[in-house]
Image (tube, grey):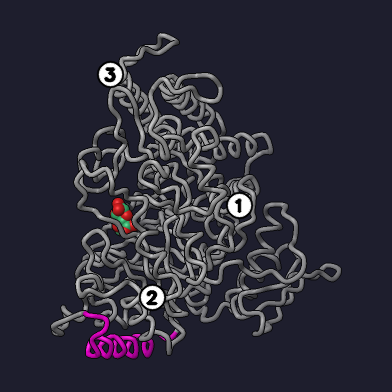
Amino acid sequence: MSEAWKKRRAWLSALKWELPENLETPAQAAAFEGEHFLAPRNEKPELEEDAGLGEAYEITSQGETWRIRGGRTGLLYGVYALIRCLLTAGKIPEGICSPYYPLRMLNAWDNMSGDIERGYAGRSLWFEGGEFRYEPDRIRQLGRMLAFAGINVLCINNVNVHAPAQGLADEWLPDVEAFARILRPFGVRLMLSIDFSMPLQRGLETADPLDPRVQEWWRQQADRIWETVPDLAGFLVKADSEHRPGPNAYGRTHADGANMLARAVAPYGGVLVWRAFVYDCMQDWRDTHTDRPCAAYDLYHPMDGDFDENVILQVKNGPYDFQVREPVSPLFFGMPHTRLALELQLAQEYTGQQVDLYAMPPMWREIFDQIGKEKAQAIAAVTNLGRDDNWTGHPMAALNLYAFGRYAWDPDLEPEAVIREWVRLTYELKPEQENVLERILLKSRSVYEKYTSPLGLCWMVNPAYHYGPSPYGYEFQAWGTYNRADRDAVGIDRTSAGTGYTGQYPPALRDLFENKDTCPENLLLFFHRLPYTWRMRDGRTLIQRIYDDHFEGYDEAEKMKEELETLGLPAVDAAEVIERAERQLQNAREWRDVINTFFHRLSGVPDEKGRKIYL
Ligand code: GCV
């Protein structure tokens, strides 16, 4: 396998020394990193392990000496925090620092074939040809990256569990343990996605969660698994979702299914993460009463309080599926007696597939501000990693991975601060260059939003592939993904007079969204069906705003490309970044022309500015 990745360190560009093979504990890793980074600067720290601190640490200084006190993994987090602050001219945190979310997890959608579902950075880093196959050095470096960012759990296989991964909880156990051993010194524990119907594949005639034979079967599985991998974090389950098996087949509820598995893993301190991404994926497009965004709340809200203590319900940030602009999922307000995990997607499935530049921190800031960080008790993200030398396809997509770890640790962070940290940790740039790059990154999401689907409409992508525009691509399909554009109007009425979706929110948000005049304009067409002649708050018509945004988005993408070309990025990344900016510009042009043409043709309304609208 290629070793070129060693030159592409994502955000660890200053940590040039290789990690030894014999690290066993985070304390050893902490001592090793401290020795290599701080000792040459005459700043060797004194490390004091205090088991009671767990993942927390405290950094103090006495004269020339840094003192780091921390728990088992806290010590390593403390060393990395100190390195981060020294490299980025950040303020050394005062007092005891601990992560906000105890479970800070990456979900890899890696298949054992080596393919990654929605993977845009090459093949799997740890699976190939139906088995575990990886470079231990690279996995060690991955562990270091994750610990440096603050991530502590990695779910290694796709939630869509395909053969042979069904056997992960079984015949692959020694491989799982060997893999876990490499990541253990970095405080990263593994999780496994499991298939609800596994008992059926192993000779039982049912997978009914209330059947004692099934319960016993899962208990035995858990016994064997935890005997081999004693620190496994738990299981992740996608059930009754997009044709995956689940408890509904036996007339059982999701609480029945989740609790049965949760009881099997409870003796080992394991958690059972159950995904709430459940909706009718066989909808007739003519059915205007069924509304996909309503589905998860309708299903789970009545079950609030029914889940066991060690069940975590994992909820995507929005009610659809990681679109560029969605409101937050109402489940965050409707499950006060259930532990929830917020699920984000770093893989840019609908947001440019790691070709288009798309920095996520501004979007996450909005999400945390709307939900309130305390509404979730854990956090997870679908990774954007792969075997490409630069780890994430677009070198700057690494920002999203780094930032996810930082937000998981501290959801109060400002996007500007996280972006600055990543830029400083990754590149050595002059202050003027840093400013330009930070500005580009901060703006990148709004640029993408402008040239793609307007005003919260969603789903105008090419079906299946999800890159590039196709305004009617999903319109007559079974996935519940419609924009209902016709010659007079566009959007879906989700108010109390329409599908009733707004009623799933608490009163303040419900009223905000319900009213066309207060609904945030960037979500207007998500919540309302409006004529093209609708007056936006600045006096423009809706149709004119759509045209303007698409022209502007393209122009801004062009400017971004020019700025990236002249920025003076280090050679190791420059060519790749510029080549992707060119592809992004072609993409933006296609989006602009396809979407504007679509609305022009439907509405017959010309652009007030007389620009050419064509394909
Ligand atoms: C892993 C979307 C994606 C699927 C993904 C699914 C999910 O539908 O397109 O690839 O499956 O979400 O989150 O389970």
Q: Which residue is the site of mark 1?
A: 425
Task: Tell me the CA gap for discs 1 and 2.
Answer: 27 Å
Mark 2 crowdedness (10 Å alpha carbons): few <14, some 14-19, many ≥20: many
Q: Which of the numbered marks, if any, corresponds to residue 245?
A: none
Find residue 601 and name its label: 3
Residue 393 at x, y = what percent? 39, 47
Q: For disc 2, does the CB lie below 8 Å from ligand 1?
A: no
Q: Position of residue 344 (x, y in %)?
A: 45, 55
The CA distance from mark 3 to mark 1 is 48 Å
Question: Dividing the image into 4 quarters, which one contains the N terminus?
Answer: bottom left
Disc 3 marks a residue whose amino acid type is: Arg
Q: Is residue 26 above or below residue 393?
A: below
Secondary structure of residue under mark 1: helix
Q: Is residue 122 above or below residue 601?
A: below
In this view of the protein, which residue sits in the foreground, 195 or 567?
Answer: 195
Distance (Cα) linking label 2 and label 3: 55 Å
Q: Is 463 rendered above or below residue 607? A: below
- Write the residue at 49% across / 34% down: 516
Residue 6 is inside the magenta segment: no
The three-letter amino acid code for the residue at tag 2 is: Phe
Which of label 2 and label 3 is nearer to you? 3
For mark 3, give the secondary structure: helix
Magenta-colored segment: predominant secondary structure: helix
**What residue is at 55 percent from the left and 36 percent from the top?**
518
Q: Earlier in the sequence, mark 3 or mark 1?
A: 1
- Classify mark 1: residues with Cα within 10 Å, few (<14), some (14-19) or many (20+): many
In the drawing, what numbered circle is on residue 179? Answer: 2
